[in-house]
Amino acid sequence: MATALASESLLGRLARIARQRGLDTTPGPINDGPSPDEPGHPAYHHRQRVNAALAKLNRAVPPRYTNATADMPQVARWASEVAMNPTTADSLMLWGPTGTGKTHLAYGALRLIAESGPGRFGVVAATFPDLYAALRPGASDPVERERTMRRVMQTPLLLLDDLGTTKDSAWTEETTYRIINHRYNRCLPMIITSNESPIALPNLVGDRIASRLIEMTTRVEVSGADRRKVAR
Ligand SMILES: Nc1ncnc2c1ncn2[C@@H]1O[C@H](COP(=O)(O)OP(=O)(O)OP(=O)(O)O)[C@@H](O)[C@H]1O
Ligand SMILES: [Mg+2]
């Protein structure tokens, strides 16, 4: 007996003592992977993507719309489609009378997309009048203007607010066509808002742009009272 004990390995001895004390020594899986707070864990990287996207979005959002929400089911649905399939999702056109909350919904939708933690996030947001002002000949040197144009055409997400508030000219039509056609060809999602009905699009922007917008957008009517009047 003494010899048997002397030849027993240390591990064997520990196992025997554990058994005597009723402890289960069956080996289980060793979990030495990263915790959700550590690099390497999917939750950690998801959180990093959300934070990076929100930081980019916050730089593009005017203070009035900081807390905007996509509180309309069709708009929230569109945002989740873009979050899931950014290369195949439609664009969104929000249309309706002034003050009904189109810009609010647009920024809310962008926030939902950022919060989904997309792999690639970037956003440019502007009104059509501000866009034309930044791009018009003489606004800055031609290289700078072309760089702005490229950003608008290529950004993963584009919000262009207030279609139809600028008097149309050959130059605005050509500029709008370049942007819309580029994004149409590459299936890059955008949000357009307008006070005008989609039926008015051909008159507003010409047949070629209107035709592309009709094909590429999900159109959502935003109706109701002017919230600016109601709030007073
Ligand atoms: N769902 C909402 N909850 C709270 N405030 C809202 C909501 N929607 C809009 N608002 C507020 O109502 C005002 C008008 O909204 P918004 O600017 O989005 O209207 P709009 O439809 O874009 O108007 P316009 O056609 O004149 O550009 C803003 O002050 C906005 O913050
Ligand atoms: Mg608006």
Image: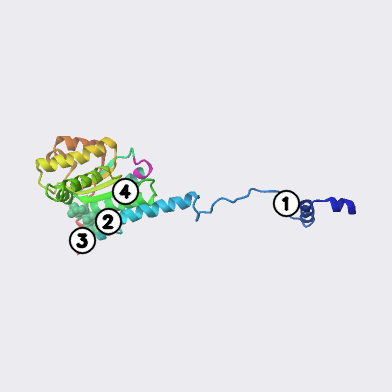
Secondary structure, mark 4, is loop
Q: Position of residue 118 (x, y in %)?
A: 38, 47
Secondary structure, mark 1, is loop
Task: Please state which amino acid type lies under the numbered disc 2.
Answer: Val
Distance from disc 1 to disc 3, alpha carbons, whole Å, reads: 71 Å
User: What residue would you read off at disc 4?
Assistant: 122
Residue nearest the observer in this picture, 141 or 120: 141
Distance from disc 3 to disc 4, alpha carbons, whole Å, reads: 34 Å
Q: Which mark is residue 61?
A: 2
Task: Please state which amino acid type lies under the numbered disc 4.
Answer: Gly
Which is nearer the N-term, disc 4 or disc 1?
1
Q: Which mark is residue 25?
A: 1
Count of numbered circles in the view: 4
Q: Position of residue 181 (x, y in %)?
A: 22, 37
Q: Is mark 2 within 8 Å of ligand 1?
A: no
Q: Residue 85: within the magenta?
A: yes
Disc 3 versus disc 4: nearer the observer:
4
Q: Position of residue 177 (x, y in %)?
A: 18, 39
> Tags 3 and 4 in contact by the CB under 8 Å rule?
no
User: What residue would you read off at disc 3?
Assistant: 230
Secondary structure, mark 3, is helix
> Tags 4 and 1 in contact by the CB under 8 Å rule?
no
Disc 2 versus disc 3: nearer the observer:
2
Disc 4 versus disc 1: nearer the observer:
4
Which is nearer the N-term, disc 3 or disc 4?
4
